Amino acid sequence: MGTDAPTADDETTRLTEYTELHGCSCKVGQSDLDSLLADAGLTGENDSLLFGIGEDAAARKLTDDIALVSTVDFFTPIVDDPYDFGRIAACNAASDAFATGAVENIDCLVTLGLPRDVTESAAPILAGMADALDTMDGVIAGGHTIMSPWPFAGGAISATARPDALLTSHGASPGDRLYLTKPLGTQPAMGATRVTDEQFVEIVTDAAERPLDSIASEAIAWMTTTNRDAMVACREYATAATDITGFGLAGQSRVMAARSNVGIELTHLPVIAGTPGLSTLFGYGLTDGESAETSGGLFVSVPPAATAAVESAFDDAGVFYRAVGRVTAGRGVTIDDPTIEEVRS
């Protein structure tokens, strides 16, 4: 399925004006979510599932050869172009399934909410989602659309994999190397696009030290890059995996460290060129790994003996990757004066 993406001239409204929080920064905070699950009594394992609450997706064993993975993810606009919003929403939702190793038979049940005065955005949002799913050999299988004061889009994703091919955030071991498959910086990159005050635009441009439209277009390109190819490349080598979204690299690292009962040391942060200065200006904490990411990369642990093989697999697949740290025998996450690499597409 194909469509022509709307241009900026076609826009009559700015989707981001309808929300206070954008993209995956609208997620409930990590500590608040933990408290919510505890208060609801949803912290235990479920014997009918291979894994569930607390992981990126839930998995149920159907046969010895097939596990069904399901997840749901939706968020408020991080861009104003509805077509791009749809593409980002689909890539982000499917990423949670890919993070578990499930990359086959991708179906999406769309969740879409829009204010009455921007309902004309529905069709291009859906077209963007359909086109993004097509790149993953996935389809829109249905969904649900409502009127909402805050626009949002995403979907319930189902996918399949062999049960023995699935990954969780539990498997990291001391000595493992850690890889990230997209650069960081989507929050400051897109935050800059929402600045409209002419005087502040100059300050923002000076902070970035490169054209803001270049930073934004690169961020959109990364957010609309599916994580499917990266997971196919690393699945047989990885011991644990998650994807980087609203909790940021540091937050997702804390999840992996806690669930694997290990320490994580982050030493190298690849970022979209120009975003560190924007992050400092906006106070997003990018160089500390705290900035929220939308449709970010996979974060995987790999045993030392497999690093050459996984890097070769990433190279063969044409996938961006960087070694960003290691797993230790300690506890928690350490980010001590990491190397900041500014990446240009």
Image: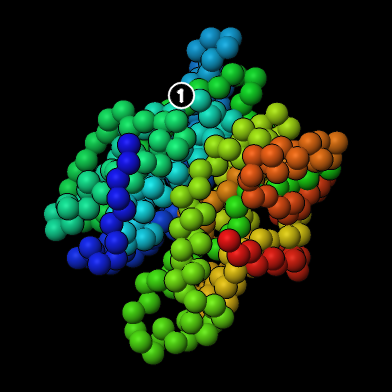
Q: Is residue 88 above or below residue 18?
A: above
Label 1: which residue? 105
**Place of residue 205 in the rendered image (x, y in percent of width and height, measured from the top left):** 48, 82
Residue at image location 70% in from the left, 29% down from the top: 236
Q: Mark 1: which amino acid?
A: Asn
Which quadrant would residue 279 be assigned to in this image? bottom right
Residue at image location 55% in from the left, 37% down from the top: 228
Q: Secondary structure at mark 1?
A: strand
Residue at image location 33% in from the left, 46% down from the top: 128
Q: How many marks?
A: 1
Residue extending farthest to the bottom is 199
Q: How is the image coloured?
A: rainbow
Q: Quadrant of the C terminus?
A: bottom right
| Residue 36 located left or right of residue 311 | left
Residue at image location 36% in from the left, 41% down from the top: 131
**Place of residue 47 in the rendered image (x, y in percent of width and height, measured from the top left):** 54, 18
**Place of residue 117 in the rendered image (x, y in percent of width and height, measured from the top left):** 14, 58
Task: Kindly tell me whether residue 230 is visible in this rendering.
Answer: yes
Residue extending farthest to the left is 116
Which quadrant would residue 164 be assigned to in this image? top right
| Mark 1, other Cα within 10 Å: few <14 / some 14–19 / many ≥20 | some
Which quadrant would residue 310 be assigned to in this image? top right
**Place of residue 145 in the rendered image (x, y in percent of width and height, measured from the top left):** 22, 40
**Residue nearest the observer in this picture, 70 or 78:** 78
Task: Kindly tell me whether residue 255 is visible in this rendering.
Answer: no
Q: Quadrant of the N terminus?
A: top left
**Residue nearest the observer in this picture, 4 or 96:** 4
